[in-house]
Amino acid sequence: MRAPLSARRVQARWLDLRLSAFCLPSLQREEKSKWRVVDSEADFPNSRLAMDKTPTRIALRERCLFPPPRSGGGRRFDKADAGSEERRNVAGPGKTMTVERKPVAFGDLRGWLQALDGAGELQTIDAEVDWNIELGTVARLAQGPGTGPALLFNKIRDYGENARCRQVFAGALSSYRRIAMMLGLPPDTHPRELVKLGRTVLTGAIPPKIVSSGPVKENIVKGDDVDLNDFPAPQWNRADGGRYILTYGGVVTKDPNTNVMNVGVYRGMVAGKNMIPMLTWRAQHIGHHATAWQQLGHTEMPIAVAIGWEPSLDFVGGAPVPKDLSEYDVIGAIRGAPVELVKCETVDLYVPASAEIVIEGFMSFDPATFLPEGPYAEFTGYIAGDRSPKSAIRVTCITHRKNPILRGTIEGTMPGSYSENSVTSSVMRAATAWNVLDRAGVPGITDVWCPPVQAGVNVVVQVKQSYRGVAKQVANALWGSSAAHVRYKHVTVVDDDIDIHDYAAVDWAIAFRVNAGEDDIVIMPSTFGAGLDPSVRKRDRNVAQFGTGKWHRVLIDATINLDYDPDPDLGGARFPPTVRPEQKDIDAVMKRWGELGLDKPKR
Ligand SMILES: Cc1cc2nc3c(=O)[nH]c(=O)nc-3n(C[C@H](O)[C@H](O)[C@H](O)COP(=O)(O)O)c2cc1C
């Protein structure tokens, strides 16, 4: 946390704020004007062009709050492992952070496993673990608050020597260290830097390359030979409605009008040998595609799920990529190289050629074909009781590598055990909020953060206030945007002396800068929200009636109230000084610190 301000500095700061109201620096924006075509065997027909990279630096300014790396493992992840260098301009006003990004193409899931192992980030489990409840319980308990390792389960009950699939991999993206590795950043990169990169990382594009074959075609299973039970899909939680084979796969569909493919993460449960009911919404891009196919008179649409590849597939599939941009292009930009895609066997869709497993089929729109799905451990950390008929994939073919590894994840975040979804969301939902505020022209935003334990349902915004009312502008801009779907229920706004990555600092600001009688707490009633939130009454979860469920949203304005009168007793400042000693007193004591027999000062 930066030094709180003395009375005189508060006054000076107020003058400074008034000045800055007239001369706020504009945000530097990413140059999007230079484009080039990528050489490839065959440029992917639906993707377009790749963006040239703009060299810039983000200076690392703050002390790192990361826990030390886990012990064990061999070689640490080294920047030299990374591919071609990319530096990206993501600096905001008053931000001079620099971190170097070197995109990494891991090749496939196995290359990613090697990198994790080398960095001491992978725990392989050779003891036999039961797919039924035990594996999910291990994953949840091992996860920790962003501190647990990625887990590779090598021996799973009922899936011995002769099984088609014998391994499950989970937990890779439940840590900021590993998200940084995926993005080609040093593992100890501060989450604040990840957010800044997240502001632009979904808009880069390197088109994929079509190849004629790849390891995923080593085994092709069709028709009656298809049996989803061949795969050790875990019963992740005792209360789940079944075994979930799709928890962190890239679900591929295409717009029948434009042929642009979408890759999204949607969960799916095993229902017999060849059926997978899924949770999807018409508001998601997969839903847009379903509507488009239906409008053309089709009763079902082609679908494929790529399970187990480089981490960017999962990360980008679960992130809000703009609709007209294929996730494959974005993944290419993240890894700094085109994704190699092969055509599916039974549907006209493309999947990564070195994916571990690909499930192909058709998704029906006919309610008569819907199958019961759920309940399931939701992202909120609660088991939503819902079991209802859902549209299902009718599997027509499965292709897989030799000894395929099933990628999965334990969903549902809670204190002390942060899910992969919540850790990745904390970065991307903060980045999205910052972009929304920027586009809306809200002045003085210096940082945005969504702590991982709540996956962006609460957001904290740090501002350099230039007038009373910026906090309300922040809340209005966020709640008025489509990005507020299932996010940003509670918005807290603090001044720029509060480190929003420090829970205690935010709590301190709420305790001593919020006065509910001065309009610091504002409720925006009856907005769209999230039906999955257990605090929403059952009758208010009706998606048809309330969009995505009814939410009463709250702004907590924890900034210093600039509408207070300057206090002559405080030298004209509006707020008293804090107890932090003045710098000259600190400097004097520091000169004698060695004599006192104390450890280093705590602050
Ligand atoms: C692990 C994980 C599980 C998810 N499960 C679902 C799901 O079951 N249904 C859903 O609609 N969205 C789910 N999401 C969120 C979507 O993946 C996310 O909204 C994504 O942006 C959707 O893709 P789209 O932007 O192409 O619509 C999940 C995300 C993650 C990371």
Image: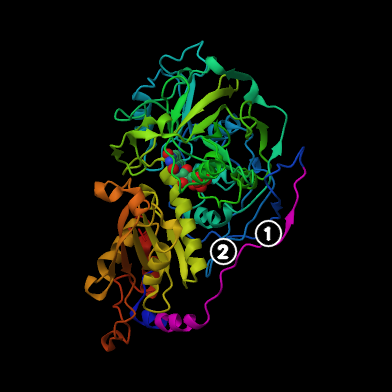
**Dot placed on the residue nearer the N-terminal end, 2 or 1:** 1
Q: Looking at the image, which residue is at 33% across and 74% down? A: 560
Name the side, left or right, on which 494 lies relative to 436: left
Q: SS class of the residue under badge 1? A: loop
Q: Looking at the image, which residue is at 69% across and 55% down? A: 53
Work out whether residue 174 can be spotted. Answer: no
**Which residue matches tag 1?**
54
Q: Amino acid at mark 2?
A: Ala
Q: Is mark 1 within 8 Å of ligand 1?
A: no
Name the side, left or right, on which 165 lies relative to 499: right
**Would you call the spot at circle 2 few (<14 residues within 10 Å), some (14-19), or many (20 or more)?**
many
Q: SS class of the residue under badge 2? A: loop
Q: Using the image, determine if residue 70 lies above or below residue 498.
A: above
Residue 22, magenta (yes or no):
yes
Instruction: Give the camera-side residue of 27 and 205.
Output: 205
Q: Which residues are magenta?
A: 13-39
* Quadrant of the snapshot with the N terminus: bottom left
Q: Using the image, determine if residue 510 lies above or below residue 231.
A: below
Work out whether residue 249 can be spotted. Answer: yes
Name the side, left or right, on which 50 lies relative to 18: right
**Would you call the spot at circle 1 few (<14 residues within 10 Å), some (14-19), or many (20 or more)?**
some
**Which residue matches tag 2?**
91
